[in-house]
Image (cartoon, grey):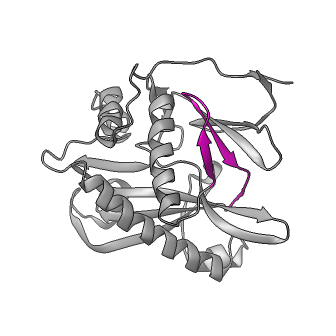
Amino acid sequence: MRRRRLYEGKGKVLFEGPEPGTVVQYFKDDATAFNGEKTGTITGKGVLNNRISEFLLSRLNDVGIPTHFIRRLNMREQLVREVEIVPVEVVVRNVAAGSFAKRFGVEDGTPLPRAIVEWYYKSDALNDPLVTEEHITSFGWATPQDLDEMMQVALRVNDFLSGLFIGCGLRLVDFKLEFGRLWEDEDMRLVLADEISPDSCRLWDVESGERMDKDRFRKDLGGVEEAYQEVARRLGVLPEAGPTDIQGPTVMQ
């Protein structure tokens, strides 16, 4: 199949969709860390992230949290609604880890007294800097009303996913969300976009504390593919044939 490529990021390629207002997301096996300073390949990651993100976004749609997800097309592709991405990443933290622990001198793994929401400007060139609501509204990246809605949705997502993952023996340490503006005629609404997967979440085994996410790649812990497969297995979405590959579409010039 020949399709026009719209955008290629670190983990996905976006292609023109079959209908107006739709986009096809193709999940790659490419892995990056530290804003692209470390690169590699996690075999089968794209297949697993496609399945995991499909499952989680579908569950969020079911409980009334709107997302851009429409349906999975095949092993590596999803059909999603075309949105205008808000250039602000929302990070929700339940446990001190990663850059947060270093920034505040807190021991990695320290439970936080409540969920903490942080904002980051979505810019690879600037290494996605931490920003305040004043920065966001002053530069026009989002309105105060947008931020209120994004905050409320992020906390709802946290409550829902934390319970879902605990039921699978996983602790949701922190995660990143992206939002998009979905235009329908003259009306606009904010919806969850991008993906929710071990690429964008820190997931620790409740009993052992073992990392089950991209930190295994960041920290050279090994067993990266197995960790992603285990998350998919616990969610009940591991492909029966395993994370097999399919050919991507031919790009139109």
In the drawing, does residue 200 fall left or right of residue 203?
A: right
The image shows residue 141 at horizontal and vertical percentages of 70, 69
Q: Quadrant of the N terminus?
A: top right
Q: Quadrant of the C terminus?
A: top right
Q: How many marks?
A: 0
Name which quarter of the figure residue 199 lies in. top left
What is the magenta range?
Answer: 68-85
The image shows residue 130 at horizontal and vertical percentages of 52, 65
In the drawing, does residue 230 fall left or right of residue 15?
A: left
Residue drawn at (32%, 60%), measured in percent from left and top? 162
> Residue lying farthest front?
62
Residue closer to the observer: 218 or 5: 5
The image shows residue 96 at horizontal and vertical percentages of 28, 61
Main SS class of the magenta portion in the image = strand
The image shows residue 52 at horizontal and vertical percentages of 44, 41
Name which quarter of the figure residue 144 lies in. bottom right
Residue drawn at (56%, 55%), measured in percent from left and top? 128
Residue closer to the observer: 41 or 203: 203
Residue drawn at (35%, 27%), measured in percent from left and top? 225
The relative height of residue 201 versus residue 115 in the rendered view (above or below) is above
The relative height of residue 41 versus residue 171 in the rendered view (above or below) is above
The relative height of residue 57 versus residue 90 in the rendered view (above or below) is above
In the drawing, does residue 127 fall left or right of residue 138?
A: left
- Residue 102 visible in the displayed image: no
- Residue 235 visible in the displayed image: yes
Residue drawn at (65%, 67%), measured in percent from left and top? 190
Magenta region includes residue 71: yes
In the drawing, does residue 231 fall left or right of residue 148?
A: left
Magenta region includes residue 211: no
